[in-house]
Amino acid sequence: MIGYNAKLLRDQARNNLYYNTNSITLAGGESLDVILDATDTTRYPSGSVFYLYTPNLDHLSNDAENFGGLMTEVRIN
Amino acid sequence: MRTMKMNTTFSKSRLLLVPVLVMLFAATVYASAPGITGTTFNLTARDAFISQPDGASVYSWGYGCSSAPSGFNPPATLMPGATCPTMQVPGPTLIVMEGQTVTVNLTNNLPTSAGNTSILFPGFNVTATGGVVGLLTHEALPCPTPTACTTNTVSYTFVASSPGTRAYYSGSQGDLQVEMGLYGAIIVVPTAVPTGCTAVGSIPAHYVAPGNSAEADYRLAASAYDNPRSCYDREYLFQFSEMDPGIHKNALAQVTARTGCAATSPTCHLDVPTEPYHPAYFMINGRSMPDDMDPNYAREYPHQPYNGNPHMHPGEQVLLRIIGQGRWQHPFHEHGNHVRILGRDGNLILSSTTAGEVNLAGPLLFTTTTTPGLAMDGIFYWTGKGLNWDPYGHNPASSDSTAKLPCTPDANGYNTAATTALNYYEWCQDHNKPLEAAPFGDVAGGGPATLPDPNILANGAWFGGSPYLGPNATVRAVGPTGTTPPSGTIANSPTGEAGFAFMWHSHNEREITTNNIFPGGMLMMMLVDSREFQIDESN
């Protein structure tokens, strides 16, 4: 994660404060900038697909229909 | 005419409010992060009614202790009256040491129609035994006749692998059971004291006024994580949740209608809709304001033992352990400064710039938004930096020796050389800069503001008529004859505590109401106390 609300994660002594995480949390009106690093082609080979989704399970549905909501895919071309 | 009418209305409401405030804020009480200790915890899930400040008793489910815990932290010597009832909201805070193997035995004593229940400990590798296998973990079956039951207890075992604050909550029918109150916190404390941190029990003495004794140490540990940059001086745990009373009423009606039903009967279950969701109670540690500012373990809340009532001295590093336990996010805003996040869900956030890097990388947050199931640890501190006036009201011409203290800036601009000084951690750039140009006390002019005459201004619950911190703060603002006119403050005595009050609250304004009545809900007052005032967290 490299930025929060359009501010680079770097302190006044120019230390980089970016960090690695497997989940990000957003409140209303907030924005984040993250970099997905897929340079390791052994772990992320061409053609592989990864889910991008909320761990709040009740947000993974469309009303009464299961398998929907806040989920999409990251495809490595 | 219209203005006059509005004024009359306001006066009437204030007349009504004053006696209420006297009643509510009469006792000065503090928090910390109290909980139960040990390696084996025998918990139960039960139903009971919890209290809300509008007078409502809300039918709820909660975890509690089925047998006495091994211990309490802070211990009973520091916090008399510590108990672990058989049902409480939030559930007992489990305080364990890093690396320990922890066993939690859960017995289901919920009404039979409530069905199975369980506990999830996200962030740990849990081995579950007993009960029956459920969707997410092993579940304890309900038991209408406890003596004949063999499957209503389930055991969870895990190693408390890394320090930090985490949530635990029901893994069975979570939309209903978490709403009903089945959630709590687990705190893993580091085993070692990182270099530079102060071990528990050896906190340095601050300025102690005559008649006061040095403070006891209520911390659970010297640091939040195994990192020398996570030392702290004081700590508080805040769990945010909300309740829709309609769901609770419906659950009670169905439980009552199915009293005595056999677990095997196809009709012995609840069908409580949890959508649409209309919460009306917004709670910190299971209590709504002003109940959250009453003592820990207060007898009037037998099922809501934990409070939310932070105090601190200037410059102290205060660890906030914050958990979202409900279904909604809550924008928790700490007035007075930003919060530097240390870690999330027990994961210390470090910069990954270079190998072995130890720079903290957690964001500096204006508002620490709570998210369901997510815990964060952060550091808050208050100094006068940025006020552009001297919060102690120092004045070289004063006849009061405590008003003439020196301020020697360290590399960061703070007065830190004398750790027992009354103005330790003063921001020296504003030293000898009083607030008022034309004061009523003995402070000379030059300040940026003119305050209303405290001899005329009616005081509220938190403002003592003096804008200054420290002994004789009232004299500095009001004059040498200074007593606080006309009746003194109720909750923040200008002669003793002389603190600054900051509202810590949800930034979603509806959430600072109790059943739509202001004030209430997710709101508490944080007090920055002058250093001669002994902060006693025992209650």
Image: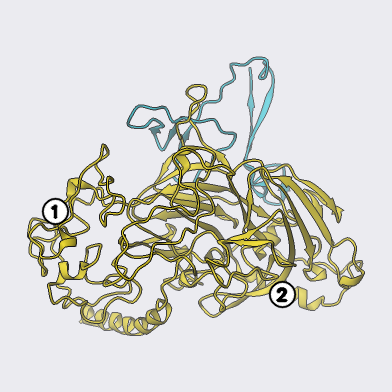
Indicate the colour of chain A: cyan
Observer-nearest residue: B6 or B90? B90
**Residue B84, numbered circle:** none
**Judging from the image, what secondary structure is the residue with disc 2 in?**
helix
Mark 2 or mark 1, which is nearer the start of the sequence?
Answer: 2
**Disc 2 residue type?**
Leu
Indicate the colour of chain B: yellow
Q: Chain of mark 2?
A: B
The residue that label 1 is drawn on is B433
Height in image: B158 above or below B184?
above
Quarter of the figure that contains the N terminus of chain B: bottom left
Residue B452 visible (yes or no):
no
Give how far across and how far down residue B173 sits, in percent. 74, 57
Count neighbours of disc 2 (C-alpha within 10 A) and say few if under 14, some if 14 to 19, many if 20 or more.
some
In this rendering, the label closer to the viewer, 1 or 2? 1
Q: Residue at the spot x=75%, y=65% of the render?
A: B44
Q: Residue at the spot x=48%, y=50% of the render?
A: B369
Instruction: Give the spatial CA distance, label 1 vs label 2.
Output: 60 Å
Height in image: B373 above or below B109?
above
The residue that label 2 is drawn on is B252
Say which quarter of the image contains residue B456: bottom left
How many numbered discs? 2
Height in image: B424 above or below B531?
above
**Judging from the image, what secondary structure is the residue with disc 1 in?**
loop
Give how far across and how far down residue B79 sits, in percent. 53, 67
**Disc 1 residue type?**
Lys
Height in image: B97 above or below B509?
above
Asked whether the residues under marks 1 and 2 belong to the same chain, the reply is yes
Q: Chain of mark 1?
A: B
Observer-nearest residue: B158 or B272? B158
Q: Is residue B455 left or right of residue B362?
A: left
Q: Residue at the spot x=71%, y=74% of the render?
A: B252
